[in-house]
Image (cartoon, grey):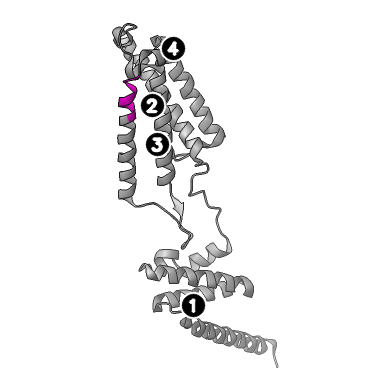
Amino acid sequence: MSEQPRNAAAGQRQKQYIKETNKEAGKAFSEYGLTRKNEEFVYQLNKQLEAKGVTADKKATFIDQTINDLLAGQKKGQTAKAQFGTPTAYADELINPKKKTSEVPENSNFWLLALDNGMMFFAIFAFMFGLIAFMNPNSLSPNGHYGSSGLTAILIIAIAGGLLFGYVAKIMAPYKDKKTGKVVQRNLWLRIGLIVLAFLIWIGIYTLTALLPNAVNPQTNKWVYIILGIVVFGADLFLRTRFNITNNVFGGAPRNRK
């Protein structure tokens, strides 16, 4: 017998074996309660993993994981294509997973967020009152009531703003859903409500600081305000870079060190 017919017969047997294996796999997938389209997706995914030489243990893990995700998606009306794309592309993704960029902020520690926001508020108000004094020298009159322009008032406003908006930033940050394992956002109206509530509380605190007596709320000259604003602003930028603080009220993008 020639070598060619023998190879052809071996190839035919291999094709038949693969066909029967896939047929058995298809029967097994039908027992999970998947929709027909999702069942077909798993069947095609199994074929792709088989063709790419994935070991039986790994293939079983990939398939089980996919079926669980599909079942969870079905409850929300999601299709396999919406979740994973094509079976071929998803098989490649399972075999060669890409390094994911962090979807959750790298450093969203509440106290760091509060300190970051508080320093930024202090810098803004100090610089603002210094700038106003340049345009209107009488705004920092030593004979009047200092109100919100006093250093103690600015410090209280900054601390309150830091704590309030640090908490809001923490609550509004994307979080990982324990059921699906995916990163999701909180309800839009909840986020809007939190921002409005925090802002109203902060405005109330700002208004109350205007009642502070001068004895505990000293005021300085315009140059000191300007210098304090610039120095604290620079210190805050260093803090954000050093600890890679993200998702604060002034911007969510991380400031990565080079």
SS for callout 3:
helix
**Whole-number angstrom distance, CA of label 2 to CA of label 4:** 18 Å
10 Å crowding of disc 1: few (<14), some (14-19), many (20+): many
Specify the amino acid type for callout 4.
Val
Element type at mark 2: helix
Q: Quadrant of residue 53?
A: bottom right
According to the image, label 1 marks what residue?
Answer: 43
Residues under labels 1 and 2: Cα distance? Answer: 61 Å
Q: Amino acid at mark 3?
A: Leu
Q: Residues within 10 Å of mark 3 (few under 14, many from 20)?
A: many
Helix, strand or loop at label 4? It is: helix
Q: Nearer the viewer, residue 170 or 95?
A: 170
Q: Which residue occupies the foreground of this view, 14 or 257?
A: 257
Q: Nearer the viewer, mark 1 or mark 2?
A: 2
Please tell me the numbered disc located at residue 164: 3
Q: Nearer the viewer, mark 4 or mark 3?
A: 3
> Of discs 2 and 4, which sits in the foreground?
2
Among numbered discs 4 and 3, the one appearing first in the sequence: 3
**Which residues are the magenta region?**
205-212
Tell me which label, 1 or 3, sits earlier in the chain: 1
Does label 2 or label 3 sit earlier along the sequence? 2
Name the quadrant of the C terminus.
top right
Question: Residue type at mark 1?
Answer: Tyr
Judging depth in this view, the residue of 165 and 100 nearest the camera is 165
The dot on residue 224 is 4
* Sooner in the amino-acid sequence: mark 2 or mark 4: 2
Residue that mark 2 sits on: 157
